[in-house]
Amino acid sequence: MTNRNVTIIYYTSNREGPGFEARVQENLLKVCGNLPIISVSQKPIDLGKNICIGDVGASGFNMFRQVQIALEAADTPFVISAEADCLYPPDYFEFIPPRLDIPYRNSNLYVMPDQRGYFFYKEEGATHAQIVGRQFYLETLKKLFEGAPKWSVEEKNFPKERWHKADVFDKIAYWRSKNPVFQIKTHKGMRYYTHSDRTPIHELPYWGNGGKVRAYFLHGKNEI
């Protein structure tokens, strides 16, 4: 894959198990082609161009500060998100939006609940599966962070707790990858639960059986 329009921004508070996060990173490198990666972490990691900010704590506020740092370090028109508890198929990185001034979130999104070998569908999309115009994203965050401290562990639900709005973006568009993106909830990340449908789905296209997927990525058992 050759694409001069997109940089992957990977941000992590390094709260997940090191083996799990290492396998997530291995998958990312396997499927992303030669897209550049900017990783912003709270511990040093070997992934693309790494910017280690130190242990500032896990919160929504700090997550978006890390995103801001990644945006400032990138130089492509678009950035596409990747997170430490999420698994992405190759076609997730192939979509290029028609506009630079609106976020595009992937609607083919699932979550794997804690200690379960199946998936739930997450209809509304999420920040961990989106592509956005880099300059537009950067300007949006700069406005939201005006007058704010550098870091804050109190504001888990930024920008809701500061600006009384549910999302950093006022408008959101959606696209759908051929194969699904999914997040594995381990209860070690910032949010204990995530909103989703509650109908168990035991297999996903491209990924296969949920139990085998979980065994490999969480515990390193039997490569899928």
Image (cartoon, helix red, strand yellow):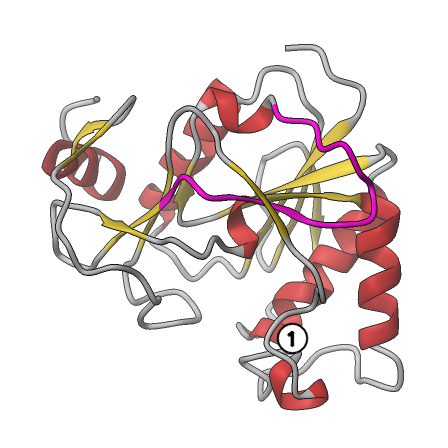
Magenta stretch: dominant SS? loop
The quarter of the displayed image where residue 115 is located: bottom left
Q: Using residue 105 as the reference point, say whether residue 149 is left or right of it.
A: right
Q: Nearer the viewer, residue 53 or 129?
A: 129
Asked if the stretch drawn in magenta spans residue 103, the answer is yes
The residue stretch that appears in magenta: 95-109
17 in relation to 178, above or below? below
Q: Which residue is mark 1?
A: 61
Which quadrant would the N terminus be assigned to in this image? top right
Q: Quadrant of the C terminus?
A: top left
Please state the horizontal and vertical placement of residue 217, each as a whole percent of the image: 26, 37
In front of the other: 74 or 161: 161
Residue 3 vertical position relative to residue 186 in the rendered view, above or below: above
- Where is residue 202 shown, x and y percent of the image? 11, 39
Residue at position x 38%, y 26% in the image: 179
The type of residue carrying mark 1 is Phe
**Is residue 85 located in the magenta-colored stretch of the structure?**
no
